[in-house]
Image (spheres, rainbow, N blue to C red):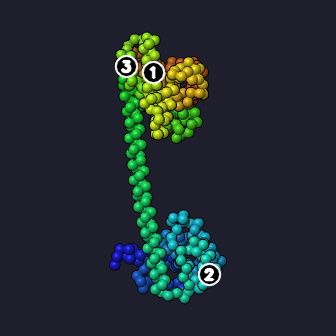
């Protein structure tokens, strides 16, 4: 016997009819054809429980029943299942008028067989409905497998994209004698500030993922300037400032949501709240909030990190500078957000500490 025929015989069938004689007759018909799982129900009020208990693959349903008729049971079935999960329902009734037939089909029945029924016709209709049901379930399962593979592949690509962003961010930092953990700490600090500022999980996460690229433009700045141990001349400082435009040019016009945010950060994280920053002298809320957030995270980490040309500042001194620069270098509201999450910031510093 073909596999599909074997599977049909294993189907869970529920027969609902208030007449025991009808239930026995239908059970005998199916047992003669080697259907192994036929459950009967004489009380229509018990159908909801049977749906949970049995998870039927097909339901044979009478219309004329006391208290809750077949149309009422159809309503119960429809409420129990989603449209894609509802098993086929065949109405089996002595009522042969077109009005009831149309009402049954409109109410969610898949087929309509009148009593007295021909056994072969009933079996064939049941077989067709079960074949469609199992094929539909197989297709749903296949679609779920494909959807899962797409989700896994998308997750892999997202992970790869995020790793590329982080590594490119590290490349910019290494050119400035800084370390990979700097961009990691800045990204995590930025996430905390964004969340505290009420930006929501999605936007805060985007800022976290994009912020490692904030100094990517340093790859276009001369080593003699980046590595100079002493104070830069005005001309050298102007060349150093140009890294924000270089970074913005690298990142601009991308379709990636992360890189769009990274572009804003790279371009504006050296702007100052009082309008005295660079490259465009933006002030206040004209500076994108992504740039205002990363400015705080970047400066705090730079101050509290040791470099070949300076000692690390104590945390309280660095926080004091941020407080002093409220309304000048930094957005005062965002400085308050930073201070509010300082305990978590310090945990991140400890986790990503570099000697």
As helix, strand or loop, the secondary structure at mark 3 comes to loop
Marks 1/2: CA–CA distance: 81 Å
Judge the density around disc 1: few (<14), some (14-19), many (≥20) Cα neighbours within 10 Å: some
Marks 3/1: CA–CA distance: 11 Å
Any part of residue 308 in sight? no
Residue at mark 2:
98
Q: In the image, residue 272 lies at what x, y percent?
A: 55, 21
Question: Which badge, 3 or 1, is on the more N-terminal residue?
Answer: 3
Judge the density around disc 3: few (<14), some (14-19), many (≥20) Cα neighbours within 10 Å: few
- The quarter of the picture where the N terminus appears is bottom left
Relative to the observer, which residue lies in front, 6 or 162?
162
Marks 3/2: CA–CA distance: 87 Å
Q: In the image, residue 321 lies at what x, y percent?
A: 53, 18
Any part of residue 260 in sight? yes
Relative to the observer, which residue lies in front, 301 or 349?
301
- The quarter of the picture where the C terminus appears is top left
Residue under the image location 57 percent in, 70 percent down: 77
Q: Residue 222 carries which label?
A: 3
Residue at mark 1:
242
For residue 352, above or below residue 79: above
Question: Which badge, 3 or 2, is on the more N-terminal residue?
Answer: 2
Q: In the image, residue 263 lies at what x, y percent?
A: 48, 32
As helix, strand or loop, the secondary structure at mark 1 comes to loop
Residue under the image location 38 percent in, 13 percent down: 229
For residue 227, above or below residue 93: above
Relative to the observer, which residue lies in front, 313 or 26?
26
């Amino acid at each position: 016997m073909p596999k599909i025929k074997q599977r049909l015989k294993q189907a869970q069938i529920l027969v609902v009819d208030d007449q025991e004689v009808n239930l026995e007759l239908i059970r005998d018909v199916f047992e003669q054809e080697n259907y192994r799982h036929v459950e009967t129900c004489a009380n229509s009020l018990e159908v909801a429980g049977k749906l949970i208990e049995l998870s039927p693959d097909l339901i044979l349903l009478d219309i004329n029943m006391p208290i809750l008729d077949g149309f009422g049971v159809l309503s119960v079935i429809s409420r129990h299942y989603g449209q894609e999960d509802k098993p086929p329902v065949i109405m089996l009734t002595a009522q042969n008028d077109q009005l009831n037939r149309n009402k049954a089909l409109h109410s969610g029945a898949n087929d309509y067989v009148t009593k007295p029924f021909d056994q072969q016709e009933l079996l064939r209709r049941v077989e067709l409905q079960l074949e469609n049901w199992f094929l539909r379930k197989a297709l749903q399962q296949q679609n779920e497998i494909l959807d899962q593979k797409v989700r896994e592949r998308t997750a892999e690509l997202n992970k790869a994209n995020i790793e590329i962003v982080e590594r490119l961010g590290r490349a910019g930092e290494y050119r400035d004698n800084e370390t990979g953990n700097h961009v990691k700490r800045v990204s995590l600090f930025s996430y905390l500030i964004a969340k505290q500022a009420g930006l929501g999980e999605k936007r805060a996460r985007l800022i976290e993922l994009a912020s490692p690229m904030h100094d990517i433009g340093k790859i276009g700045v001369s080593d003699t300037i980046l590595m100079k141990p002493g104070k830069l001349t005005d001309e050298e400082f102007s060349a150093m400032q140009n890294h924000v435009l270089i970074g913005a040019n690298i990142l601009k016009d991308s379709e990636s949501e992360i890189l769009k945010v990274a572009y804003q950060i790279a371009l504006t994280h050296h702007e100052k709240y009082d309008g005295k920053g660079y490259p465009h002298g933006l002030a206040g809320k004209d500076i994108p909030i992504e740039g205002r957030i990363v400015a705080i995270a970047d400066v705090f980490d730079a101050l509290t990190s040791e470099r070949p040309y300076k000692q690390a500042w104590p945390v309280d001194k660095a926080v004091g500078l941020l407080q002093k620069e409220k309304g000048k270098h930094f957005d005062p509201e965002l400085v308050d957000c930073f201070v509010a999450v300082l305990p978590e910031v310090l945990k991140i510093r400890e986790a990503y500490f570099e000697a």
